[in-house]
């Protein structure tokens, strides 16, 4: 049976850490310091998630590392500004992975209670993720990365989809973790 806590996920996350470190260095060499700061944040956060060995399922470590690498691709090669759905996919996947990890950490004291209230759990996690996406969009507006309302709306939609997917996967992890 598939598990959210297979040791191979953590090993793959460490490989992702290596490539993310390379991406930070490349971004600095390119002179893209705002991108390097963003990627360094992902690198540090990903490192912290991996170090929270017993508190998070190992699959969450890998998914966060993949999200960080997607963001690295956007910053290093400018994929966020190319035609196509790269920005939207990255928004959905990043919100998905951040929601998974943070919600599991934040709500871990209540996991036993949520075991008997699955719908409440799904709504709580999805709402948490949508809030994370909204805060990110406010941040993007504040630093004027994006000044286009259509992009903001599509990002919020993708963030909501990512949050919903996170709630479903988190429920699977909850059922595995709490007997």
Image: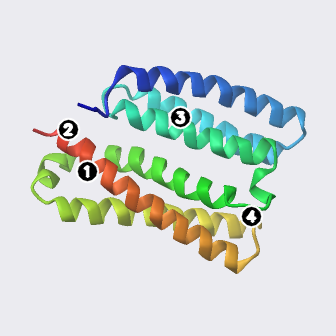
The answer for how far apart the CA atoms under marks 1 and 4 are is 35 Å
Q: Which mark is residue 46?
A: 3
Q: Are marks 4 and 2 in contact (CB under 8 Å)?
A: no
Q: Is residue 45 visible?
A: no
Q: Nearer the viewer, mark 3 or mark 4?
A: 3
Q: Which mark is residue 171?
A: 1
Q: Nearer the viewer, mark 1 or mark 4?
A: 1
Q: SS of the residue at dot 4?
A: loop
Residue that label 2 marks: 176
The answer for how far apart the CA atoms under marks 3 and 2 are is 23 Å
Q: Position of residue 100 (x, y in %)?
A: 39, 48
Q: Position of residue 148 (x, y in %)?
A: 74, 76
The crowding category of the residue bearing disc 4, from other C-alpha atoms within 10 Å (few below 14, some 14 to 19, many at least 20), is: few
Q: SS of the residue at dot 2?
A: helix
- Counting labels gives 4
Q: Residue at x 84, y 35 (%)?
A: 28
Residue 177 vs residue 103: left or right? left
The answer for how far apart the CA atoms under marks 1 and 3 are is 22 Å
Q: Position of residue 113 (x, y in %)?
A: 12, 52
């Amino acid at each position: 049976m598939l598990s959210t806590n297979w040791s191979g996920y953590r090993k793959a996350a460490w490989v992702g850490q290596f490539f993310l470190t390379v991406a930070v260095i490349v971004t600095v060499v390119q002179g893209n310091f705002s991108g390097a700061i963003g990627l360094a944040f992902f690198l540090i956060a990903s490192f912290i998630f991996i170090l929270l060995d017993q508190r998070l399922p190992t699959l969450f470590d890998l998914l966060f590392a993949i999200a960080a690498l997607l963001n690295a691709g956007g910053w290093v090669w400018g994929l966020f500004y190319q035609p196509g759905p790269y920005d939207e996919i990255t928004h959905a996947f990043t919100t998905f992975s951040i929601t998974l990890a943070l919600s599991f950490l934040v709500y871990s004291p209540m996991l036993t209670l949520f075991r008997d209230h699955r719908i409440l759990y799904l709504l709580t996690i999805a709402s948490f993720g949508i809030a994370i996406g909204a805060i990110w969009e406010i941040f993007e507006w504040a630093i004027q990365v994006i000044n286009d309302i259509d992009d903001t709306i599509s990002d919020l939609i993708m963030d909501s989809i990512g949050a919903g997917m996170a709630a479903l996967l988190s429920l699977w992890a909850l059922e595995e973790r709490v007997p």
